[in-house]
Image: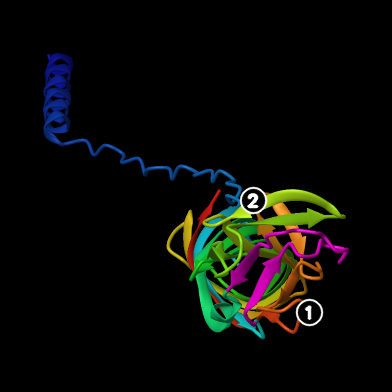
Amino acid sequence: MKIRKYLILTIIILLASALCFAKTPVKKAIKKPVAKKTIQKKTTPKAEPKPNTKIENSSQPKNHNIYLAFSALPISIEGFENSDFTDFYDDKKQYQYIANEGRIFLNSENLNQQTYLYGCMLGYKYVYNKLGFSIDVNFHTTNDIYLLSSFLGFEYRFITNQKYYIGLSPKIGYSMLLINYGPAEMAAGYADSTVLFKNGKPVYEIKSGDSIYLYSHAPTFQLFFTSGYSLGANLEIFGNIGISFTKYNNTQFYINNNFIKFNSEQFVNHMSYSSFNESNKIQSIGAIINIGAAIKL
């Protein structure tokens, strides 16, 4: 009996202990978070873009220019006197028996003047760095005077930037001058025509109203201070001021496609048979200006 009591008591104690243990909360172990190792990726620094070493410098242009300009230059004509053409002698001063002498009156004194010729200039220029090379044609006229010239030029731009330039330009060329005498006027009391001779042979008969011109040609030199201002990538305006130097020594008459030299014996003083004293002087020496625009190609 006693064993049963102890056995029952032991079972009751075990059950009570089990119930107490079941009611006691079990603390769970808190796992500390493990710090993850962060692996830093090696990043190579980006290479900075290299600066553009090719810098465009507007002070060193390289282009082709076509330009058109207004132009004015001086001309001086002096020393001309009234004179005649006669067929009493031929151009070699060999006596010609002409029953009715013809004589053309040349009102040369009206040619004497100092004035400016106005016209235009058309040309092409190649520019590289500060240097320029040009070729142009010029035409000027006033008071029945016509001048045609062509030039080759060199330019050095000693001040230049993106907007403007200043330089110096010498030019050398050749000029042809034509002066209109007007219609032939027969001297009063003489025949109504005059025979022109060349190398002792008659070449043309001048009649009243025929056109008479004075023709001359000579090398010419010009020196300019040049300046220009850019209005954009393809257009600029410019202005040049300088001096012109030309002396016309080889002077001839041009009558109906025939050239008659001043030293012809048919060219005499007015109402005389003495050879004309050639003391005239034609020259273009003085200030010259050009104002125009250029297209850059």
Which numbered dot is residue 256? 2
- 93 is within the stretch colored magenta: yes
Which range is magenta? 81-106
Camera sees residue 171 = yes
Residue 239, given in percent of the width and then of the height, sits at: 51, 73
Where disc 2 sits, the SS reads loop
Compared with 69, 274 (above or below) is below
Where disc 1 sits, the SS reads loop
**Residue sitting at 21 percent across and 35 percent down?**
26
Residue 289, given in percent of the width and then of the height, sits at: 54, 76
- 54 is within the stretch colored magenta: no
The residue under label 1 is 274
Residue found at the far front of this picture: 99
Compared with 112, 139 (above or below) is above
| Residue kind at label 1, given as amino acid type | Ser
Crowding at label 2, few (<14), some or many (≥20) Cα neighbours within 10 Å? few
Magenta stretch, main secondary structure class: loop
Camera sees residue 63 = no
Mark closest to the chain's N terminus, 1 or 2: 2
**Residue sitting at 63 percent across and 54 percent down?**
206
**Residue sitting at 78 percent across and 50 percent down?**
202
